[in-house]
């Protein structure tokens, strides 16, 4: 059995989280997210983001969160802008289009959108023969583990507000982003500088779960109807409440992030030391060393990791991912094997 | 805190199930339902239904299962027929219509469809100005806990086959149905006499999960694409595999059913003894005593149960639901209090 | 060749209308309804309805008008209520559902909705597990040629306003309705007592065309985007402008209505005289005599008309429809033949 | 009033066409395209394309034709590939996405797709996390008036067949394409080398109308249901039959094409003679001279034409369009004014 650096959703839940699920197992709770744990979890998050007027809804997974929020907010002729590598554009099997909306794309710059490109897109869409851009979707960290700076986020949100666009942040890996060394954006900032964002749990220590935070109260109306319609209202919603409560009650959210980032950094440093080129210099839990075919084959014997893109016959961008479950000993082994490459 | 007979999704998971989740928690698995546990669970179910050619997909919840299967199978102009009380018609916030399809209704007879009514519906829809009925949806047990007999199921399926209709069975409460005293339909029969059905786990001892069994191989093509598009492909799909494996490895599926049905029967007998009228004579885990306002108020002090329908100012159809988590002592207490009514 | 009383869309256009199309044929106009004729037609209609703040959009056909308006106005979880016989419920092949919205039905009383029934529907839909009723759709004249009185319309609109429902009137046969003997609702009233309605042209002397009047300005926003998206923005939109201008410039709208109603009345009187039972006593351009098999066969030799419903083996509800194109001599012949039955 | 070279849908209908509409105006016909004229028109077209097994459906407009055909043919997870400038991608307000399907784009090469680019797209979409490309959409002539050669069409169709993709040709301007000097593809070829195509009438002498030809009989099933659902079944369908019959009964289809192409060529030659650069060298009814600001202003005084794209402050790609209605004297005037630039 290979040691997995394949992704951050290969194991169950952080032991603290699972312990709580076990503890509460025989308790009887109200269904569909109307229970006390959900309430407590919401309160903890609202306190953490310092924005009591925001509203929080718990989902099981990211695609569901994205499609439900976008479908709830846009009118039929309105489109969402994202960069070409955006998850909703590429890896959700057309889930947004299946709710009737076009995804407009702009070039990706290290996984991020640029305001000038959004502006071009906006200026191009001028009349009723074309869709109307109404939302900007970004991910943080991005698909390739990069981060928006506070300055970038503020400027982007200001641009969106001026141009009557909603800003929505996919935070499937927000925990790793927030705790990255180079990061300067806090959860409080996300409550201030976007219309909605979500805090990913599935890839951050939970069995499953994403916490959608809607800052713009106009976008909250009847939201639970749309959740139910899309099959996104979990019957045993208290399972989400229990988990998110535990994630925020004792800073576990930050601890997990630090662990996964440290593990990733250590590995990345080993690659650097070995003078192996990186696709990007990552601060988060995904790293992208560019391996030769020989190096790839060598590591492939013992480790599970993925091919991001083949540059040519002998250069492969690979991806190694760490998580709450990544063990120090596995990292040590990997580093040893990197040294020997 | 009241004792809950409110529904069958108020607690976590049957201890055997949860134990397995805990045991496997730190194991690393492949994502999205391609893991070994899912494979083993599928094999166990296929053996149980004695139909190796069927295909099995695991979902998190029932609404998601219904909308994904229906959207995958129907062309845009095709509609699904169900009885007026059908869950997809009433309690899923228009999820089927949101995928573009009309839900046609026929009168409900004790929660069940009648072939003559379906036939009327079919004969009425004759040309391209009307939708084309293409699927019949039933629930077993039904919304009010009634059951289709094997004879009824066979006749319905024969009718569907003759008339080029798919038959789809919502089995959110199939576990209770299959183990009901009066039941004569086995899982094997469901593999033979419908195009697809699902085995509900959420209301039957799992944290969450429904196992969709597609018997008609024509309906299997590209199914996972539609699952992903609807946000129904769980990242940590192995959680579903672990749970369904445990449900079927040692007859737990049947044990849970027997427990919940026995608990329900005991309570129903207490109501009968007290000469309290029943809305229907139930064999499954939902019972429907008709209480006077005074009786209702009395039981409401200590127990959580729901109002199904108010018949008049003094007659309330109530619903009591049992589950794997229902305790004998709680039932004993309730029976004692029924005696005192 | 049989003489047709089959429907009101069997011939081309009223000669005055067609003459204008021919006159303007070689003129060069701006596309997509932004031309001068559309403007003039809009102005004439606004004057006629005495409501300068309403907005008018021209469509080619009725199904398109219905689906575009409903899809533009409702959010994903919202539904439209109509009576069971409503055109959008039965005869538009699920076009509303195809845009994602459930059509909720109430019993039909002579083709009309009843407020009490709508109210029941509203009270039943209470939480996020069910769709949210948000619009009431009626037709005037109805599917069976009946009419709403001014009192009924006012009460219905007041009810809708109080309950936060939009009222939308399908006026495919509004011309016949407005000019019916028993009618007391004017176009001005429709500008006052509903959120939107349309004035049917296809069945009222035009080659094709429906004029949607949106009274509620909240529902006007970006409407042309939705029209374009649904394929409802005619390239040579001026054809609609030319026709609707002619329809309203010299009271042609009313003249056509009077002609078709008078023709229908004359025929209906012949049936009454012959003591042939009527399904309803009609004031509009559709009449529904109940014929015996023998009577049906007799008239069927020379005339084209349709079967509405077979009551039993010897009683057939038939439908005869008149239009701007119905000729006095054809009516005379028919009456003669009715006498001989 | 300026002389219009703005587009090919500014006037009514070719006099021969309109004459027929007037002649048949008082005839009574069956509705919804089931009349004799539609039958005769279909037969004429089938003879012209020499493919008796194809099926023909008449639509009012192009967007409607595109969205109806695509929605009818694709399953929910399937996508259509077109080049970036494709009409369905840019100028139909997301109509395809509104039916649930993603539009995948490849770079445009003079308005055309390249097989290598389609192949890249196909190879990139490999699993159920991404949409499945299932159709290639092209226009002929393209958005910029270019043409596919027979060799290109054959290769593209062979590629599509090999890769299980449908090929669909938007022929809104097929009449101009077929009659272009450099063209070597006949209507017969389109019956052989694609799954479906349509013959545009709106921009080719009809009041309105597009004739969709479905060559692949698998794609014909229940097609009229989808047409009705999308509001695309014209009540007075005989108007389409009358027009298309006249278009094909006496080679009018080809005559109109020759006229519009000759007019365009004459104008283009005048620009060439004046040494004004062309964006592309056109053989069809759209030409694209690149004017200086001064030249633009000069012609703008007397003529209506459009800006295609501003290259820089002093270079404007303009578009002049000719049609059946373009008059020799207007062309002569324009040429004179070009000479004076």
Image (cartoon, coloured by chain):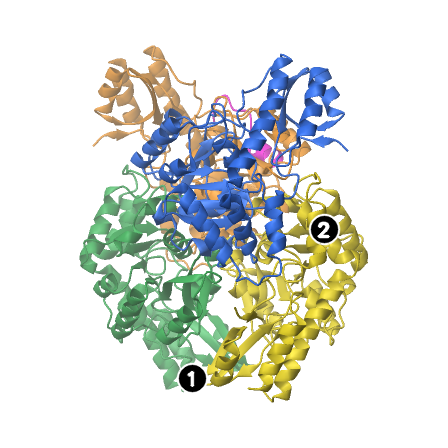
Chain colours: A orange, B green, C yellow, D blue
Camera-nearest residue between A213 and C45: C45
Quick check: A321 above or below D33?
A: above
Few, some or many residues within 10 Å of mark 2 (<14, 14–19, 20+): some
Which label is found at residue C20?
A: 2
Q: Nearer the viewer, mark 2 or mark 1?
A: 2
What chain is tagged by disc 1?
B
x, y (%) of residue C169? 66, 63
What chain is tagged by disc 2?
C
Quick check: B180 above or below A30?
A: below
Could you say which quadrant of the image residue B257 lies in?
Answer: bottom left
Alpha carbons under labels 2 and 1: distance apart: 74 Å
x, y (%) of residue A234? 44, 53
Label 1 belongs to which residue? Answer: B277
Q: Which residues are magenta?
A: A179-193
Camera-nearest residue between C160 and A230: C160
Residue C100, magenta (yes or no): no
Q: Residue at x 36, y 68 (%)?
A: B322
x, y (%) of residue A45? 54, 42
Residue D113 shows in the view: yes
């Amino acid at each position: 059995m290979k040691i997995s650096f394949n992704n951050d959703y290969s194991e169950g839940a952080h032991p603290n989280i699972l312990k709580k699920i076990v503890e509460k197992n025989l308790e009887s709770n109200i269904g569909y997210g109307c229970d006390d744990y959900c309430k407590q979890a919401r309160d903890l998050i609202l306190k953490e983001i310092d924005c009591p007027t925001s509203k929080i809804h718990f989902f099981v997974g990211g695609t569901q969160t994205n499609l439900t929020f976008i479908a709830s907010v846009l009118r039929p002729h309105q489109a969402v802008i994202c960069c070409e590598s955006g998850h909703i554009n590429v890896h959700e099997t057309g889930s947004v289009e299946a709710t009737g909306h076009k995804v407009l794309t702009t070039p990706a710059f290290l996984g991020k959108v640029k305001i000038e490109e959004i502006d071009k897109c906006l200026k191009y869409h001028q009349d009723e023969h074309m869709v109307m851009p109404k939302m900007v979707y970004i991910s943080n960290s991005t698909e390739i583990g990069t981060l928006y700076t506070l300055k970038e986020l503020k400027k982007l949100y200001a641009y969106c507000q001026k141009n009557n666009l909603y800003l929505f942040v996919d935070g499937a890996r927000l925990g790793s982003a927030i705790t990255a060394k180079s990061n300067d954006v806090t959860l409080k900032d996300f409550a201030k500088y976007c219309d909605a964002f979500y805090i990913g749990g599935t890839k951050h220590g939970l069995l499953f779960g994403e916490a959608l935070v809607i800052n713009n109260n106009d976008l909250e109306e009847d939201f639970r109807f749309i959740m139910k319609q899309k099959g996104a209202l979990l019957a045993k919603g208290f399972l989400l409440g229990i988990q998110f409560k535990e994630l925020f009650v004792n800073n576990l959210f930050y601890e997990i992030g630090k662990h996964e980032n440290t593990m990733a950094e250590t590995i990345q440093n080993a690659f650097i030391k070995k003078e192996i080129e990186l696709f990007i210099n990552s601060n988060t839990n995904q790293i992208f060393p560019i391996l030769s075919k020989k190096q790839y084959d060598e590591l492939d014997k013992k480790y599970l990791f993925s091919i991001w893109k083949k540059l040519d016959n002998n250069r492969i961008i690979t991806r190694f991912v760490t998580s709450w479950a990544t063990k120090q000993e596995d990292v040590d082994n990997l580093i040893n094997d990197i040294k020997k490459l």
